[in-house]
Amino acid sequence: MRPITRTIAVSGVSTGTWWPLDIYVPNQVTTISCALASGTATYSVEYTNEDPFDTAITQLAVAHPTAALTGATASQTASTTTLMRAVRVNTAAGTGTLRVVVTQQSTE
């Protein structure tokens, strides 16, 4: 899977859209890097294991298993072997620019 790269304009509270991941990567490790490019922001990374394409349901959002990506106020990078079907970034406060890169790879 190619990395997902998004630049988010932070302006207070917002709920991000789901970014689907490749659920067929064997023994996957997902690394998420959030770089605060400008300004200040408080943000959190969440994941879901429900179908991000099913608009008839509200996906169960789960906090990223690395605590540093929950309520973060600075640039952070974390990796996990937790299976995730989709991820998103929510902002809680601040203004500025946040660059997010999500990389999935197989350990095989």
Image (cartoon, helix red, strand yellow):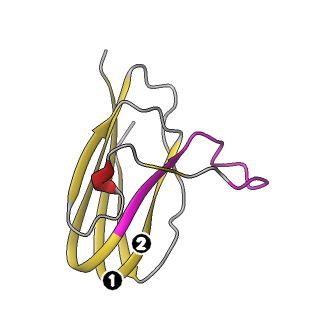
How many dots with numbers? Answer: 2
The residue tagged with tag 1: helix, strand or loop? strand
Label drawn at residue 105: none
Circle 1 residues within 10 Å: few <14, some 14–19, many ≥20 = some
Residue 46 in the magenta stretch? The answer is yes
Residues under numbered marks 1 and 2 in contact, where contact means CB atoms less than 8 Å apart:
yes
In the drawing, does residue 62 fall left or right of residue 26?
A: right
Q: Quadrant of the C terminus?
A: top left
Label drawn at residue 91: 2
Type of residue at label 1?
Answer: Gly
Type of residue at label 2?
Answer: Thr
Q: Distance between the residues labelled 1 and 2?
A: 8 Å
Which residue does the image show at 42% across and 83% down from the upper left?
A: 12
Circle 2 residues within 10 Å: few <14, some 14–19, many ≥20 = many
Residue 88 is situated, as x and y percent measured from the top left of the image, at 47, 57
Residue 44 in the magenta stretch? The answer is yes
Which residue does the image show at 38% across and 43% down from the upper left?
A: 65
Which residue position is annotated with label 1?
Answer: 94
Which residue does the image show at 48% across and 41% down from the upper left?
A: 21
> Residues in magenta?
43-58
Residue closer to the observer: 99 or 71 = 71
Residue closer to the observer: 37 or 57 = 57
Image: 66 above or below 27: below
